[in-house]
């Protein structure tokens, strides 16, 4: 199996399928074994499709669906067989899961497949934009000299006290989230800032490579901590061979505008140069 995954990684351009690239990389490094992960692949014409499922028993599982192109017939038989193979291999994951998928034929095909299942689902979608760092941006970020105001310092996150603060301040935290936060701190790059002994700013990253939950306590904002943490984490990600990337939710218009103007980030666009929307779709079996 390891040889097959290595073959997939070797033949995958990370900028085509950023989530799949990092999930494969972490798997081959022996990380996140606590969450069983399945990898599924099809080549349809000139397009490669990658479907990855990370099974989480106490929380919704994660499913990512990416392709190297958009020229795929909706509900192509190979797509439908890919979805069915994944569901048969990991039926428990399909009780509750969050799907990450770009809008287009592949998303439409997955929704059509789900709609034909006997099981019915409640569905909630949270659309996002994906931003990443190009090779030139990564080089410039690695040359940054990142500093903090007097009284603040970068430090390692404590697996107990700090993990709880990180979890309690995350808008998307659910039941049993602390356990997942600890896994992210164990296996993924993270950055934390202290004022005295207190954690006042931080950001962690996920098994799919995304930087998430950039947060600064209210009384310590407007001091450059957020920007310093984000760029420091990007350096940490680059240092282990990852490509910095992040999702910005469309409802957060200020963050979308700020990131669109940030020279350190490149927005993921379609072939026409328009923003490519990634839907995070939450499925819960009824």
Image (tube, helix red, strand yellow):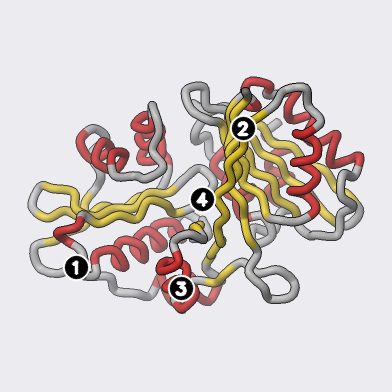
Query: Which quarter of the rendered picture does the C terminus lie within?
Result: top right
Any mark on residue 122, and which? 2
Residue carrying label 1: 148
Sequence-first disc among 4 and 2:
2
**Closer to the eye: label 1 or 2:** 2
Tell me where residue 190 appears, x and y as whole percent.
Answer: 35, 50
The residue tagged 4 is 209
Q: Earlier in the sequence, mark 3 or mark 4?
A: 4
Q: Circles 4 and 1: CB distance less than 8 Å? A: no
The residue under the point 37% across, 49% down is 204
The image shows residue 56 at horizontal and vertical percentages of 52, 27
Instruction: Identify the mark at residue 257; answer none if there is no mark.
Output: 3
Disc 4/disc 2 C-alpha distance (Å): 28 Å
Which of the two labelled residues, at mark 1 and mark 2, occupies the earlier sequence position? 2
Upstream in sequence: badge 4 or badge 1: 1
Q: Is residue 246 visible?
A: no
Q: CA distance from mark 3 to mark 4?
A: 23 Å
Q: Is residue 5 above or below residue 130?
A: above
Residue at the (63%, 20%) spot, across then down: 92
Q: Secondary structure at mark 2?
A: strand
């Amino acid at each position: 199996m390891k040889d097959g995954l290595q073959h997939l990684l070797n033949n995958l351009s990370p900028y085509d399928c950023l989530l799949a690239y990092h999930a494969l990389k972490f798997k081959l490094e022996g990380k996140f074994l606590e969450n069983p992960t399945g990898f599924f692949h099809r080549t349809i014409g000139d397009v490669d499709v990658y479907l990855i499922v990370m099974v989480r028993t106490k929380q919704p599982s994660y499913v990512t669906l990416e392709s190297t192109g958009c020229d795929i017939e909706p509900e192509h038989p190979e797509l439908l067989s890919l979805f069915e193979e994944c569901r048969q291999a990991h039926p428990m994951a399909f009780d509750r899961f969050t799907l990450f998928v770009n809008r287009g034929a592949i998303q439409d095909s997955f929704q059509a497949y789900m709609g034909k299942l006997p099981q019915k689902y409640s569905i909630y979608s949270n659309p996002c934009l994906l931003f990443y760092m190009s090779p030139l941006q990564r080089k410039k970020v690695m040359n940054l000299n990142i500093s903090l105001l007097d009284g603040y310092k970068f430090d390692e996150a404590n697996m107990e006290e700090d993990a709880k603060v990180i979890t309690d301040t995350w808008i998307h935290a659910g039941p049993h989230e602390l356990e997942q936060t600890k896994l992210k701190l164990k296996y993924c790059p993270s950055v934390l800032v202290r004022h005295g002994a207190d954690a006042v700013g931080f950001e962690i990253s996920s098994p799919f490579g995304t930087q998430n939950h950039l947060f600064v306590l209210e009384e310590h904002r407007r001091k450059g901590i957020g920007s310093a943490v984000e760029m420091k984490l990007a350096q940490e990600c680059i240092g282990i061979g990852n490509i910095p990337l992040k999702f910005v939710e469309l409802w957060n218009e200020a963050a979308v505008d700020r990131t669109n103007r940030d020279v350190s980030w490149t927005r993921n666009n379609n072939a026409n140069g328009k923003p490519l929307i990634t839907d995070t779709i939450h499925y819960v079996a009824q």
